[in-house]
Image (tube, grey):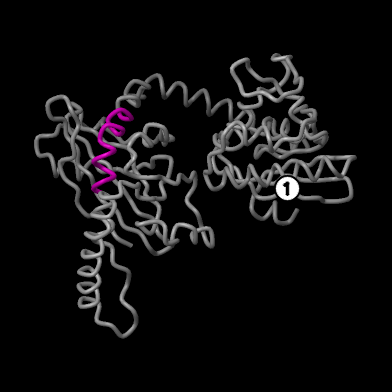
Amino acid sequence: MSEIIENGYCYIEFHFTDEKNFEDLKHTFEIIKDTKNNSIKKDDAFWIKEFPEYALEKFTFLDSDLKPSFHTNNNTQSKWHFYSLIELLSINYEIEYIDLKKTSNNQGILIYDAYSYPYGGADGLINFIESFNCNVKIYDDGTGIYTYPTNKKDSKWNLQWFKKLFKTAILLFLLTSIISCKNTEKDLQFEKDVLYEVYPALIDSVWVNAVLTYVPPAPPGVYPSEYKLNRRNESNKRFNRELAEFKQKKFPVDLVFFDGVIIRDNSKELQKHFKDAIISKDNVTDTLEYKLDRKKLDTYTAFHLKYISRIPRGNDRIFYNECCYSVRGIIILSRIQFDDEKKYGVLTAGVECGGMCGYGYLIYIKKVNDKWVIDKIEDGWIV
């Protein structure tokens, strides 16, 4: 438990009577962990195959679903829909799976790191565990430690003060939103539509700039300017060869892509670039981060994106330095900042390649004949 406490992990403790149930649960958990943590997509047939029959029997399936050849639960009021649970566990949960292991002969624990709140709660994981005939006893979902079946009044922690504080904060948040929130759902949808419209030209330009301009630090004893010039000349030649090969063979370029957007305030840069842009004091940067629609990005087939849901740290960084990625690092987009009249906008595209390695671009966009186009891309920063 020291590892859990030290790292602030969430966990679910459970009991099992049949060793085979635990082995099946462990096997399926490792598959879900791999697909979730590495953003690997699997089809319905794959998941039907990986769950044992006794677990599948506990879930419901729609008439249009790929179903097992045997009878399953049809009580839609009390049981989970199988593919909804799979989508939650392998895609939508904003968590990182850490481990599932025994703690004694008939006790086990599932450990995970919730890196966003609210992340979806522990209900999906509990149902997953119990479908393998294991009984959940205690869980910590990040707000407290509870016995199961859940009775929040029996929490091992006294959270009444927290609940009151939380309710007060919610009320204040709602009042503030009603009075001053200017970024409505309609505004957010407008921003998303603009991003998906400029995405093909944006990712083309970011890739070209990243491949052409990035040069790693000079080795010790080598004059930096000369080294940089030579490496850049070599990079240009290699890039032109690779670009011609890509066009000829028409196969996509592999990139690592963060599946959300981050917040950056570029209002000064927007005003400086577009002299006639009207930016009032009330035009503040929205603090909402959102997930990108992978299907819309994937319609542009010139690039094959490996999506990740969190920025790796430490040894986790190794995978994006492999040879198959033409840009060494993770591409991260920011939200778009518009002028008051929504004629102009600016966003950033960063390439995160390590603790002291990263660079990015400012991307200026504007509306021309009712279409959004890229006006200019310029170097933004380098670490």
Q: Is residue 208 above or below residue 294?
A: below
Image-based side of 144 in relation to 168, left or right: right
Q: Three-letter amino acid code at disc 1?
A: Leu
Residue 155 belongs to the span the image colors magenta: no
Who's the residue at 66% across and 26% down the image? 82
Residue 198 belongs to the span the image colors magenta: yes
What's the magenta bit mostly, secondary-structure-wise?
Answer: helix
Q: Secondary structure at mark 1?
A: strand
Q: Nearer the viewer, residue 341 or 27?
A: 27
Q: Which residue is mark 1?
A: 100
Q: Nearer the viewer, residue 163 or 75?
A: 75
The image quadrant that residue 124 belongs to is top right
Q: Residue furthest front?
A: 249
Q: Nearer the viewer, residue 327 or 72?
A: 72
Query: Looking at the picture, how far across and down is residue 323, in whole percent?
Result: 42, 62
Q: Is residue 213 above or below residue 111?
A: below
Who's the residue at 23% across and 48% down the image? 205
Mark 1 nearby-residue class (10 Å; few <14, some 14–19, many ≥20): many
The image quadrant that residue 140 belongs to is top right
Where are the magenta residues, as a range?
A: 191-205
Q: Residue furthest left?
A: 276
Image-based side of 370 in relation to 81, left or right: left
